[in-house]
Image (tube, rainbow, N blue to C red):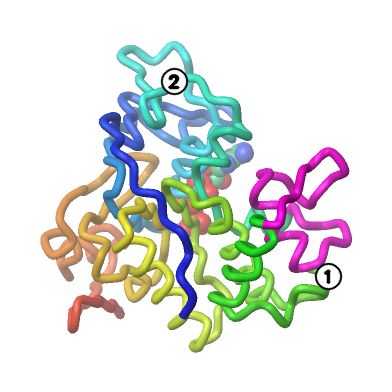
Amino acid sequence: MQDISIRSENHPQPLIDFRNVTVARDGRKILDSVSLQIDVGENVAIIGPNGSGKSSLIKTITREYRPLANSSGLVCRIMGEERWDVFDLQRSLGIVSGDLQQEYTRDICGYEAVLSGFFSSIGVYRNHHITYEMRCIVKAVMDLLEVSHLQHKIISHMSTGEARRILIARALVHDPLALVLDEPANSLDLHSLHRFREVMRRIAVAGKSIILVTHNLQDIIPEIERVILFRDGRTFMDGPKEQILTSSNLSILFGLPVEVQSADGYYRAWC
Ligand SMILES: Nc1ncnc2c1ncn2[C@@H]1O[C@H](COP(=O)(O)OP(=O)(O)OP(=O)(O)O)[C@@H](O)[C@H]1O
């Protein structure tokens, strides 16, 4: 497997510092006074029922959603900064989500989609300065994720799983400080899942943060040590994985009997 370059920098500020973050849509609180700190290099999984606010939390991290400004004690900092240019922020984070996939509506091939990760854009434009080094990185990352055969294929002609793998490659090219993954493994076949988890593990070992939203406990690689259970737009539980991922906690979270088992650093649940 080819190596992807990983920056190692010292970041005294937390990656995420949210205090009393409330987000409303249609007159309803979809995040309700969320307080959360995630340090650079920390790996976190967020689990919760449908509609509990996980994606809204991710969109607040990526600044697609803004918190209500009048909340008392509001802090909404990413890497120590309250104010971010959305493009600069997206350059510091590698983002993979179903919403992002839906933005690729015009005819963009796999190669261009991955290359566009350097510019946090949907596709590459005339004003983008593309270097030889960028092309080498795109090739290395596409090889790593085994998507080189998709380089000429138009995204809208790809299967959902193929397009998802292209987006994961796009998220990696610009060597982000953290990967923000909202159900990234949806639609991946077993081989791609295995490959993707391997890549996540390498990224985590290299000191990047991973913030992963998932419905599948098996996506929680051993390097993810902290789990947040989310319910009704709030943090319901937050702590070390082995304390949080228990049958009793998940049964309360989902409101039905859930069995959790762990083996070799991985967890699985059924009901
Ligand atoms: N832009 C929006 N306008 C109106 N309501 C919204 C908007 N974004 C989110 N919501 C509502 O906020 C709630 C939380 O949605 P969110 O997508 O964050 O949940 P989720 O936990 O990610 O769910 P899932 O597991 O189904 O992906 C839902 O009731 C959703 O309808």
Q: Residue at coordinates 57% horizontally, 31% vertically from top-left?
A: 25
Residue 258 seen in the figure: yes
Return the residue at label 1: 154
Picture coordinates of residue 259 (x, y %)?
A: 21, 77
Name the quadrant containing residue 267. bottom left
Foreground of the two, 216 or 223: 223
In the depicted structure, whether residue 69 falls above or below residue 249: above
Q: Magenta span covers which residues? A: 103-132
In the depicted structure, whether residue 264 falls above or below residue 67: below
From the viewer's perspective, tell me whether residue 175 is left or right of residue 253. right
Residue 123 is one of the magenta-drawn residues: yes
Q: Residue at coordinates 47% horizontally, 14% vertically from top-left?
A: 69
Give the total of numbered labels.
2
Q: Identify residue type, mark 2.
A: Glu
Picture coordinates of residue 12 (x, y %)?
A: 26, 31
For residue 82, which numbered disc appears in the image? 2
Q: Are marks 2 and 1 in contact (CB under 8 Å)?
A: no
Secondary structure of the residue carrying numbered label 1: loop
In the depicted structure, whether residue 31 falls above or below residue 141: above
Q: Identify residue type, mark 1.
A: Ile
The C terminus: image quadrant: bottom left
